[in-house]
Amino acid sequence: MSMTKILNKPSAESEVYDGPSKSQLKRDMDALQELGEELINLSKDSFKKIILPEKLREAVTEARKITSNGAIRRQRQYIGKLMREVDAEPIKLQLDRIKGISNEHTAWLHQVERWRDRLLADEAILAEFFDEYPDADLQQIRQLLRNTKREQTQQKPLKSFRELFQLLKTYIPEPSINLPASLIEDAADEEEDRA
């Protein structure tokens, strides 16, 4: 057998999958670091709503306090490292919900809008709404319905229209995200430690 045939012959070892390329790993790490950046830039109220592992929450909280450019860069890298150790998908789902881009969140907002429109079209629907959501304050809803109709006829800004929407959001529960049990347990332990 000639030497060229031996060199060009594919070996069984070369067909083995070695995992993602170095470039793909770097892209994945950068994506996790960007996710960490989003956590840092959240408002105080939104950050409180997010369920995170304790170490990651502490790192993000610390990063929110840092003002030095070099220190914040190192802290971002540390957050990216911590993000590699956890399942980032539940965190991304929670961020999407806060930003209002999750499909479930959008569907929920459409449901609230449909209820508002139905209530404005026919006040008899109020009984159906109360059957489904018994904690609702019917008197307040009726008042907002009257005010909205008056604003529409007088061609005033629809302040009550928006208030009605916000009120209905408090009664109609938002669908929950299915988070891993370990993440929920970590958050519960963290709450106990703070108390």
Image (cartoon, rainbow, N blue to C red):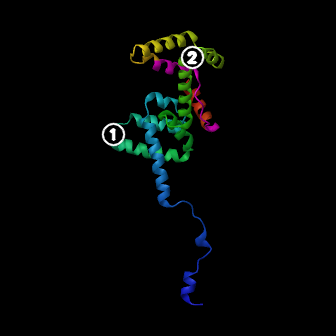
Q: Which residue is mark 1?
A: 68
Relative to 144, say whether 69 is above or below: below
Q: Work out which residue is located at the far right of the displayed protein and give it.
A: 131
- Closer to viewer: mark 2 or mark 1: 2
Q: Residue at position x 61%, y 18% from top?
A: 129
Q: Which residue is mark 2?
A: 122
Q: Residues within 10 Å of mark 1 (few under 14, many from 20)?
A: few
Closest to the observer: 163 or 179?
163
**Residue 145 within the magenta-colored segment of the rendering:** no
Amino acid, disc 1? Ser
Relative to 24, say whether 38 is above or below: above
Relative to 42, say whether 30 is above or below: below
On the image, the x and y values in percent for residue 146 come to: 49, 11
Task: Report helix, strand or loop for mark 2.
Answer: loop
User: Do the numbered discs 2 and 1 sit on residues whose CB atoms are within 8 Å?
Assistant: no
Amino acid, disc 2? Asp
Q: Residue at position x 59%, y 35% from top?
A: 177
The N terminus sits in image quarter:
bottom right
On the image, the x and y values in percent for residue 163 come to: 47, 18
Q: Earlier in the sequence, mark 2 or mark 1?
A: 1
The C terminus sits in image quarter:
top right
Q: Residue at position x 55%, y 82% from top?
A: 7
Q: Which residues are magenta?
A: 161-182
On the image, the x and y values in percent for residue 154 come to: 40, 13
Task: Report helix, strand or loop for mark 1.
Answer: loop
Quarter occupied by residue 16? bottom right
Relative to 33, say whether 179 is above or below: above
Closest to the observer: 139 or 190?
139
**Image disc number at residue 114:** none
**Residue 171 within the magenta-colored segment of the rendering:** yes
Q: Work out which residue is located at the far bottom of the displayed protein and give it.
A: 1
Q: Is residue 107 left or right of residue 132?
A: left
